[in-house]
Image: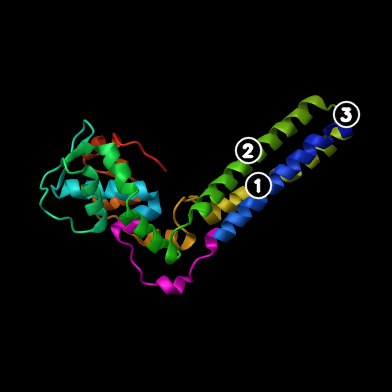
């Protein structure tokens, strides 16, 4: 009977060990940043906090909300963005990119403006600066951390189902405890790795390194723009602004 379970047991061990290795590698990669002393006293700007919290599209949301709050841009609940004062130049690169994204006609769909702003050279330059400072994760680092967590969760689910099958199908009083023990080892090892990752890497950010997350913890949201930078459009106090920006599909 034992040999019938050898293949699923081996697969459970291999899947869990592989996922744990990927998770450890992702944690090591995420921790490779500049020494904390190099950014001591460093305060994040609103766009920097937005990028580290939610990436390029969060920066675009922040820029649109800022322009709307200053009366530079009208964001309608119907999903249209309209430039109010075309002649007035924007005071930062991302805001200029947002106004440029509206186009020469002075009006465009908010989702289009949001996407073009997020993909603009201004936002890319912001990301490059944060990456150079060791505050932002590179694209492979973002994929690695989330992919490793997903793989480990799938491995744990498969191992749990294997244990359940052993419990239901094996009635031999000598073989059942032995098989359950071999199932329990990878299961609890994977749980330990997942729990450690949750403590060390929470909230599994897609954008910030551990050092970047520490700066985010020190960042204080003093107004609506700060809340949007940290938590997204849903945190905006203005219901009309939430409705207008909610029309833009969120791409991460």
Q: Which residues are magenta?
A: 30-49
Mark 3 or mark 1, earlier in chain: 1
Q: Quadrant of residue 184?
A: top right
Left or right: 183 in relation to 154? right
The spot of residue 46 in percent (x, y) is 29, 57
- Name the residue carrying label 2: 154
Quadrant in the picture for the N terminus: top right
Viewer-side label of 3, 2: 2
Residue at x 11% of width, y 44% of height? 84
Does the rendering let one see residue 118? yes
Mark 2 or mark 1, earlier in chain: 1
Q: Tell whether position 46 is magenta.
A: yes
Residue at x 27% of width, y 49% of height? 62
Number of marks drawn: 3
Between the C-alphas of marks 2 and 1, the distance is 9 Å
Q: Nearer the viewer, residue 103 or 47?
A: 103
Does the rendering let one see residue 189? no
Between the C-alphas of marks 3 and 1, the distance is 32 Å
Q: Which mark is residue 172?
A: 3
In the image, residue 157 above or below residue 24: above
Residue at x 21% of width, y 48% of height? 99
């Amino acid at each position: 009977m034992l040999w019938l379970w050898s293949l699923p047991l081996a697969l459970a061990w291999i899947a869990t060990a592989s996922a744990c290795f990927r998770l450890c590698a992702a944690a090591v990669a995420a921790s490779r940043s500049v020494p904390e002393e190099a950014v001591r006293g460093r305060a994040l700007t609103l766009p920097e906090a937005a990028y580290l919290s939610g990436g390029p599209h969060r920066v675009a949301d922040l820029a649109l909300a800022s322009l709307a709050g200053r009366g530079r841009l009208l964001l309608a609940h119907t999903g249209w963005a309209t430039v109010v004062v075309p002649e007035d130049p924007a005071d930062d690169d991302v805001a200029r990119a947002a106004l440029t994204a509206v186009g020469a006609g002075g009006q465009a769909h908010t989702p289009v403006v949001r996407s073009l702003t997020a993909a603009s050279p201004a936002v890319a330059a912001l990301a490059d600066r944060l990456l150079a400072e060791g505050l932002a994760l590179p694209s492979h680092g973002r994929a690695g951390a989330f992919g490793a967590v997903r793989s480990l969760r799938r491995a744990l689910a498969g191992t749990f189902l294997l244990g359940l099958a052993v419990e239901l199908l094996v009635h031999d009083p000598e073989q059942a405890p032995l098989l359950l023990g071999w199932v329990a080892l990878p299961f609890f090892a994977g749980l330990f790795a997942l729990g450690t990752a949750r403590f060390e890497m929470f909230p599994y950010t897609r954008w910030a390194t551990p050092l970047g997350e520490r700066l985010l913890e020190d960042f204080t949201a003093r107004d609506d723009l700060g809340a949007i930078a940290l938590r997204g459009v849903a945190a905006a106090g203005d219901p009309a602004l939430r409705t207008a920006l909610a029309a833009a599909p969120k791409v991460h």
